[in-house]
Amino acid sequence: MTTQEADRPVVKAELVCKDFGALKVLKGITLEVQKGQVLVLVGPSGSGKSTFLRCINHLETISAGRLYVDGQLVGYRERGGKLHEMKPADVARQRRDVGMVFQHFNLFPHRTALGNIVEAPVQVKGVKKARALERARDLLDQVGLADKAEAYPAQLSGGQQQRVAIARALAMDPKLMLFDEPTSALDPELVGEVLAVMKKLASEGMTMVVVTHEMGFAREVADELAFMDGGVVVERGNPREVMANPQHERTKAFLSKVM
């Protein structure tokens, strides 16, 4: 790896905008996430956090600006200063390197925990079934579910399903993990088991962008906290510093409600 590659951010957003018709949801987001960093996005509902996350792996197209993952323009090719959207197959190829964990698990209900995890490596990456199964069992062990390999989603708690979803995303060996409010659909007593897996991932050096309302997790695990409101990044910095001494009134008002 060259020095240039080592210094290159895993995520680079330059003045990213997203409009849904007349509604401007993102209004010029500029952010970078370095390799091994954890960026946590917080803010009120409707502030654009989840939309920005979805733009990172082109589940939403951007209306203006540039988004790069590992130096590659996401979802577009640039020719003559203009962006041209990639073909779906090329976008899918890019997405292989980005794991995403959603609020509502999105597991295949007709497949076991093991079946959910091996599906993408076998079908998308062409990994041999035996190797994929071995890796899937290892990942289930890592997320504390070695004994649930043959269980179907309906037989698992919400926390267990979310941990399977994390293992499924990791099975593709992503260079980046995106988490979209991964604990918000869980009963309070199940939140901790999912956060524990995410903390372990962070400690192992996984690059992560996390949308969450779990301020304790943000304080403990994030390298940087970005507070979003109204489609812009209002304030960002070291999580402990931002929480202890917010500089903007909007940040103060938000934190006073959630802390």
Image: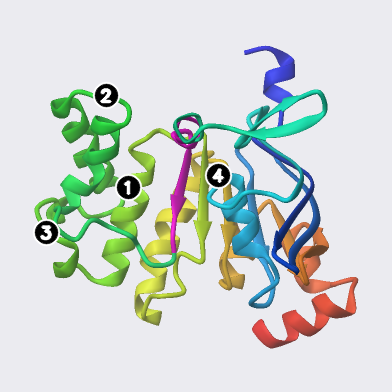
Marks 2 & 1, CB-CB < 8 Å contact: no
Span colored in magenta: 92-102
Q: Is residue 28 left or right of residue 132?
A: right
Quarter placement of the C terminus: bottom right
Q: Which residue is pictured at 48% across the width and 54% down the height?
A: 199
Q: Nearer the viewer, mark 4 or mark 3?
A: 4
Residue at image mark 1:
167
Between 12 and 15, the residue placed more toward the observer is: 15
Relative image position of residue 237 (x, y in whole percent): 80, 57
Relative image position of residue 18 (x, y in whole percent): 71, 57
Residue at image mark 3:
151
Neighbours of disc 1 within 10 Å: few (<14), some (14-19), many (20+):
many
Give the mark nearer the N terminus: 1 vs 3.
3
Helix, strand, or loop for circle 4? loop
Helix, strand, or loop for circle 2? loop
Between 188 and 132, the residue placed more toward the observer is: 132
Q: Give, as a three-letter code, the residue at label 4.
A: Asn
